[in-house]
Image (cartoon, grey):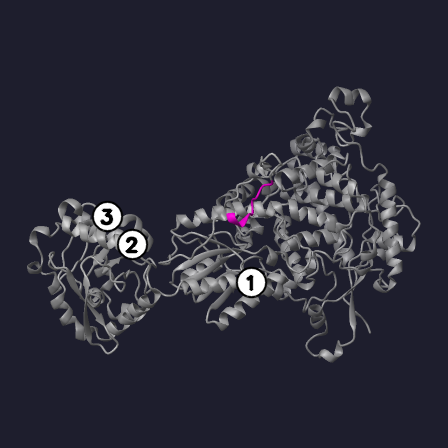
Amino acid sequence: MCLSVLGHQETRTQFQSIIKPLSTANLCLHSVLTSIYQQYFSKTEDDELQLALTLSLLEMEENQMSTRNQESQLLQSEIRGGPSSFFQLKSSSTSQEKNCTHLVPNGENTTTSAPTGSWNKNCPLQINQETEPQKSSHPNRDNQIHQTGQTLCVKESSASFSMLDTLSKDDPMMEEGDLNKSDKPKRSKNRRQRRKGTSQQLVGLSHSLLAPPPVLLWFRRDLRLWDNPALIGSLELGAPVIPVFIWSPEEEEGPGITVAMGGACKYWLHQALSCLCTSLEHIGSHLIFLKASGEVNEVRSSLHTLKQLVKETGARTLMANALYEPWLKERDVAVASVLQKEGVECKMFHSYCLRDPYTVSTEGVGLRGIGSVSHFMSCCGQNPGSPMGVPLDPPVSLPTPAHWPQGIPLDSLSLARMPRRKDGTVVDWAANIQKSWDFSEAGAHARLDAFLRDGVYRYEKESGRADAPNTSSLSPYLHFGQLSPRWLWWNAKRARCRPPKFQRKLAWRDLAYWQLTLFPDLPWESLRPPYKALRWSTDRSHLKAWQRGQTGYPLVDAAMRQLWQTGWMNNYMRHVVASFLIAYLYLPWQEGYRWFQDTLVDADVAIDAMMWQNGGMSGLDHWNFVMHPVDAAMTCDPYGSYVRKWCPELADLPDELIHKPWKCPASMLRRAGVVLGQTYPERIITDLEERRSRSLQDVAAVRREFGQYVDKCSGCDLIPLPPRLVSEALGSSHGDEAVEGKRFLLPLITRMEFKYQLENPDEEAASNPYNAVLKGYVSRKRDETIAFFNVRDFKASVMCEGVQRQERLERDYRRMEELPSSPSPRGRARRTPTAKDRFSAVPSGSVTSIK
């Protein structure tokens, strides 16, 4: 019997090189070991014999004291120094048979015979772990094992077990009289230290057939080693860990049209999985890739694949980090229910969001202002969940199983599949994405560190700038779990500059998942019933021009081209292109959502659905702004650098006209090499004001048509309240009979210009006092003024910015509390009437019920 602490895989690759010195020192022993090696790895191990071997170990432990003397008489050993030390039972080299003693259940010894050189299937036993009772009864055993070599070669199975108990410096079996003194190695102190260090690294690895059942570590969207609760939880069990990734596109998609995994997302996922596999190999493990499977005529599912894995590996525990999409949560609940009935324990850890969205409650806060991030943060503050805790360090090694399950190559998942032309050439549409990103976990941490060193100081004021890297660009790493939100929150909190705007981004992310848990149809169904009847355009040419960056509006085109080439754009530019699609092209928000899901590397169902619903006027919140496709450039690209990068055909136009080339004189266009309609497209629409007016009139028409969904007092839109919020609003004192047959309507924040347009349906958008079109937050004049202050008096610039921010906060506070507006200073332009503004009232927390 050969007992190797190297384990199955390492023995296969290293055993022959370890015993190579014996070919000159002891050719007979080398031949025997080579024969054992070749025969063992030419056969497959029998599970039933392994089980019998395990039972023999338990039986032997009970009869250990009674069998020790007998074993001492039978066992003789030879010692070889260095990493290739062996303990082998001494026998005659001319004998053609050898006796193998097996333990039977009644404790009696039965002797059988086998040909010399043959490999008894009861023999391969790898020593690395002990149960707790064994450790407590043999306190010196670890040191004794460390003093042995890497491999034990024994003749009798019973002796192999008792050897751990009897092996010591003073053991009678190890006396000089039982050894060939010429073969006894000379061990120096340094050599012993080297061997001790080698043993400490090897002993304890979970290669043993007697180790606990392995743990299945199910990776989904947590592709990291840092701060991974499921990974650390797997290590705490002290069992071998089998990391697996199961690709199931049907389950990712869910019941509706979510486009959960578009082309860009799949490409990122492919690269991230490759990087994770490399990281796991560095700590002694690797990732098993599988496709969801199913029986004949059955839908493929992760559950079926996991059941096969459990059967193949004998795993009794499944670890994973929870996902919060309703359809994926239902899948996980079904998996846990089925596997637990089969004796497999399933543990799900909270990690993907800062706050578990299923634990967020409006109790004590009410429903007033629902949909806003301020209301959500109040709910979290009023009803705190479990403590966030501190980030977890990555493991330095993973215990590996003796036998790995059969997986498939990563390429077989077809995540990064490229189309082919008719001539057979490959269309590498992701080449620019590959150049633009580092897909590894180390790349995520490097980008975070770079942002906290530099960009975070400009984020509060200049995050909307598209011509400068003032944003973190961490969203794809958060989506695929290469960076945990807890890790990001802690690092941002420790930074010298703590911009509230940046920290609130994580609250927006949690808010999106909370909304998705309340409204599972968020990605495809408008939440506000009247807006389902809006008259949308069916002009597919406008949609294609928008998707390809050929609208004739340089700022919109630059953003859409950046999206196609790199799979990303900053948040301000997403608002610009969304406003253009909805408010000016009359195309439904679902079209924009689907395109974003297919082209964004950070495409997130919850976040994209919430943002497009709000931009499409049908979400829980109404954004009180519309980005003008030209004037918005005053904020994000005042000098045209962004447009010049992504629309190089316009690079030679001056700063003043680069965002509106149709106003350039013919001579200027000629000198710049621009031919509208040829080198750069003509505008697909020209009268922006007229189209805005028509959009407002359409909104007013559907709100009049569905008057039952408009609150008569405040003019706010009403939506049916989801059951979860109904129970929270009514409290536990109301039973099911109180809500049976009733539909509860919830008033929502509604854009003020919609309220005004409802009362004045024929008004033009320009004459609406609550016109939401933004002309740009900053201007070149503002930049020059601030630059002057920075040169002459930095304190003055800080005071100026602080006063402006304080006035804005006070104005928002008064609006939320329904207080009269503060008197405006003389000489300042007024955007709203000075009279009491009845449209600024925020909807109260009352709930209307309709039978």
If you read the primary sequence from the N terminus, does the residue marked by circle 1 or circle 2 appear first?
Answer: 2
Please say if the residues under marks 1 and 2 sit with CB atoms less than 8 Å apart: no
Q: Nearer the viewer, residue 528 or 502?
A: 528
Look at 61% across and 53% down and name the residue there.
506
Look at 31% across and 67% down and name the residue there.
49
Q: CA distance from mark 3 to mark 1?
A: 48 Å
Residue 376 found in image quarter: bottom right
The secondary structure type at the circle numbered 3 is: helix
Residue 348 image point, x, y percent: 52, 64
Residue to which mark 2 is pinned: 6
- The image's mark for residue 296 is 1
Q: Residues within 10 Å of mark 3 (few under 14, many from 20)?
A: some
Position of residue 617 in the picture relative to residue 174 (left or right): right
Camera sees residue 49: yes
If you read the primary sequence from the N terminus, does the residue marked by circle 3 or circle 1 appear first?
Answer: 3
Q: CA distance from mark 3 to mark 2?
A: 11 Å
Query: Compared to 333, does 667 lie above or below?
Result: above
Residue 728 image point, x, y percent: 69, 71
Residue 671 found in image quarter: top right
The secondary structure type at the circle numbered 2 is: loop
Residue 631 image point, x, y percent: 78, 37
Q: Residues within 10 Å of mark 1 (few under 14, many from 20)?
A: few
Position of residue 108 in the picture relative to residue 798 (left or right): left
Q: Nearer the viewer, residue 244 or 840?
A: 244
Give the residues drawn in magenta, as a range: 412-419
Residue 713 image point, x, y percent: 86, 64
Look at 62% across and 36% down and name the residue there.
422
Q: Amino acid at mark 1?
A: Val
Residue to which mark 3 is pinned: 18
Q: Nearer the viewer, residue 790 or 497?
A: 497
